[in-house]
Amino acid sequence: MTRHRALALVAASLILFGLQSQGQQPLHRVGVLQNEEIPEITEAWHDGLHERGYVAGRNIQIEYRYSHAETERIPALVSELVAFGPEIIVASTPQNAVAVHAVAPTIPLIFVNVADPVALGLVESLAHPGGNVTGFATLAPEGFTGKLLQVLKDLVPQASRIAVLINPANPLHQREKAKLPEIARQLSVELLIVEASTADQYEAAFEAARTQRAQAIYVVSDPLTGTYSAKVVGLAARYQLPAIYLDRQNVLEGGLLSYGANRVDNWRRAAAYVDKILKGESPRDLPVEQPTRYYLTVNLKTATALGITVPASILARADEVIE
């Protein structure tokens, strides 16, 4: 060993000893792949990390990428995150999570707000993920879609024809579609499928709903409806269709009502799994967490614009009423 290299090693050791003696923690690296940047979610995520002692720039470095519902860009975004050298990748939406798992199977993955991770092949089971992946599912219990549509029917009791807006490119929407005939029978309504796989197809979908004389619409959650929430909400208003969504964010942007899991809180809870994995636990030993309850949000201003009087029974059930 040369004298120069020996001195360099000594210097490095002294620096490391100095950092340890000052109690400084290592700088962990975490990659995040989201559909959109939503301030409320970012705040909840950072609060969850801070509660566990992580401060961005001090002991954790977070690299963000956003797919904006452009599925063709996702593989490149995943490659950029992998090049960052993360210890963990956190991904929201099914498309993002599946892409991370495919491109970087050796990097621990925590998914957030994925409807059915077992069906997508991300985990073997909810209780025993069995691989390098775990997370927070929005998996709804059997019969949930029927309950959601019943809420819409309670709000618009005269609606006997309800449109269901799906994205045919989303495999989970195909599973949802298969349930609709039985739900229609149970609720004694006609459920009309309208489709949009790109943002420029939304207007045609709403026009198809009007042509089929739909009296209300259920907008099935998808990254596309998140990215283009304002457009979807605006079309529902223009076509005078009372709409129910899964995501509260749609209602905050002017939608009528939503019924679904607390997606913001799932990001706060995801910080706990990041902490556990950074401290040595394996994703295979961390069960996938599911919603413990579902939240009803109602926008009274939108109801008034549609000429709807919200029944007292719905107001009493609502977790949040926007006036």
Image (cartoon, rainbow, N blue to C red):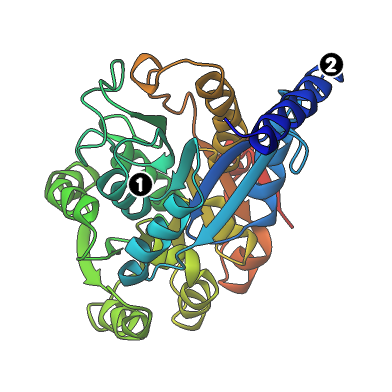
User: In the figure, is residue 323 to the left or right of 210?
Assistant: right
From the top left corner, tell me how far across and down residue 296 is, in percent.
55, 42
Q: Secondary structure at mark 1?
A: helix
User: Reading the chain from its start, which is encountered first: label 2 or label 1?
Assistant: 2
Relative to residue 319, is residue 77 depicted above or below? below
From the top left corner, tell me how far across and down residue 147 is, in percent.
35, 39
Label 2 is placed on what type of residue? Ser
From the top left corner, tell me how far across and down residue 49 is, in percent.
68, 32
The quarter of the picture where residue 200 lies is bottom left
Label 1 is placed on what type of residue? Ala
Q: Residue furthest front?
A: 2
Relative to residue 150, is residue 278 depicted above or below? above
**Residue 287 at least partly seen:** yes
Residue at the spot x=31%, y=83% of the render?
201
Residue at the spot x=50%, y=42% of the render?
86
Between 209 and 21, which is closer to the camera in this rendering?
Answer: 21
- Give the quarter of the figure containing the N terminus: top right
Q: What residue did someone put label 1 on?
A: 97
- Give the quarter of the figure containing the C terminus: bottom right
Q: What residue did someone put label 2 on?
A: 21
Q: Residue furthest right?
A: 22
From the top left corner, tell me how far across and down residue 313 is, in percent.
56, 39
Say which of marks 2 and 1 sits in front: 2
Contact (CB < 8 A) between labels 2 and 1? no
Measure the C-alpha gap from mark 2 to mark 1: 39 Å
